[in-house]
Amino acid sequence: MKRRTFMKGSLAGSVLAVAAGSGLLKPTDVLAAGWPKGAFDAQSEADMLSSLYGSSSASASGKIRIKAPIQAENGRVVPVKVQASLANVESIAVAVAKNPRPLATSVNLSGGATGYYSTRIKMGKTSKVTAYVKAGGKLHTASKTVKVTVGGCGG
């Protein structure tokens, strides 16, 4: 490597590091453009659904399966898997009814994606966990009660 090439690369890297450190490059402006802040700030499931989907009505579906423990020993890390055998799944959201902020997670899926999502959520106490799946322009739902031994939400 030539000294000149090394110096140019070092200078360019230093300039980028200073720009990023000073806040001139903000990836949050790009990455969080579609962030549903109102839905995550909502304090009821009805408000959350209205903010996230524009409607608070959802129909129960036997084509959505929630896999979560019957009893979670620690509410800080409760594994939840949602599998929807519906056509054209657009998004999946998971809500915990008795959490201070019910919306635990929300994900938008690209066209042709499988209706499957796995995550870990926090639960403050024993509560109903509800999966909301938007497919074909309609909102479907399924629920499961999870008992929590040690709380994780502090509220």
Image (tube, helix red, strand yellow):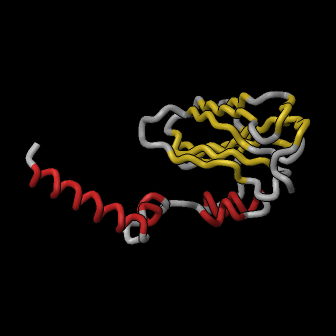
7 up-or-down from 93: above or below: below
Could you tell whether 116 is left or right of 70 in the image? left
Q: Nearer the viewer, residue 54 or 81?
A: 81
- Identify the residue at image location x=80%, y=28%: 69
Q: Which of the 4 quarters of the picture holds residue 42?
A: bottom right
Instruction: Give the residue drawn at x 67%, y 62%.
Output: 50
Write the residue at 42% across / 35% down: 112
Whether 112 is drawn above or below 18: the answer is above
Front-most of residues 39 and 84 = 39
Q: Position of residue 129 (x, y in %)?
A: 78, 41
Labels in figure, total: 0
Q: Quadrant of the N terminus?
A: top left
Residue located 70% across and 49% down the image = 104
- 23, 110: nearer the viewer: 23
Left or right of residue 10, residue 52 in this image: right
**Which percent across, then down, holds residue 59?**
71, 45
Name the residue furthest front: 3
Residue 28 x %, y %: 47, 62
Residue 155: quadrant of the picture: bottom right
